[in-house]
Amino acid sequence: MHLLRILAILFAAVALVTLVGCHTHSINTTIINNGNGPVRNLQVDYPSATFGVSQIDPGQQFHYRFEIIGSGTAKITFTDPEGHTHQNSGFALREGQEGAMTITVYQNGDNVWAAGFSPAQK
C-alpha cells in the first residue's frame, strides 16, 4: 500500500511538471476590414506557414492564433473590391515570441500593422 501511494505521488508530480512546462508561445491576430467593400482572398504569410480567409466584409474582423517556428517577416495579400491585388509587409517575427498583432486593411493597400510582442520585436 505504501508503494502505491509513493507511485501515485510520483505520477502526480510528473504530470504537474509536464503541464507547467508546456507553454505555447502564440500570436493572437486580428484583421480588420476598414474599407467600404469586402476584401477577398486574404492571406497572411508568417515564418513556416500561412493562414487566410476567403472574404472579410466592411467593418468586420477575422481572428486567428498561430505559433512562430523560425523567423521571418509577416506579409499580407488580398484582393480589393475592384479586383486589384495588394501585398504589404509587416513585422519581423521570430520563434518564441508571443502577444497580439492587429492588421487594419484599407482597400487602397495602405494597411496599418500594430503589435505587442514578448520578447519585443527587433
Image: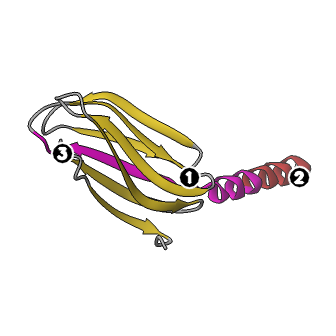
Residue 35 in the image: x percent, y percent? Answer: 13, 41
The three-letter code of the residue at mark 1 reads: Ile
State the separation of the CA atoms marked 2 and 1: 46 Å
State the separation of the CA atoms marked 3 and 2: 72 Å
Residue 68 marker = 1
Q: Nearer the viewer, residue 67 or 40?
A: 40
From the viewer's perspective, tell me whether residue 49 is left or right of residue 54: right
Q: Alpha-carbon neighbours of circle 2 within 10 Å: few (<14), some, or many (≥20)?
A: few
The structure residue drawn at horizontal position 51% and vertical position 60%, both measured from the top left corner, is 93
Q: Which residues are magenta?
A: 13-35
In the image, residue 27 lies in the stretch drawn in magenta: yes
Residue 88 in the image: x percent, y percent? Answer: 35, 50
**Mark 2 element type:** helix
Q: Alpha-carbon neighbours of circle 1 within 10 Å: few (<14), some, or many (≥20)?
A: many
- Tell which tag, 2 or 1, sits nearer the viewer: 1
In the image, residue 38 lies in the stretch drawn in magenta: no
Q: Nearer the viewer, residue 117 or 114?
A: 114
Q: Which residue is mark 3?
A: 108
The three-letter code of the residue at mark 3 reads: Asn
Q: Are marks 2 and 1 in contact (CB under 8 Å)?
A: no
The structure residue drawn at horizontal position 63% and vertical position 55%, both measured from the top left corner, is 70
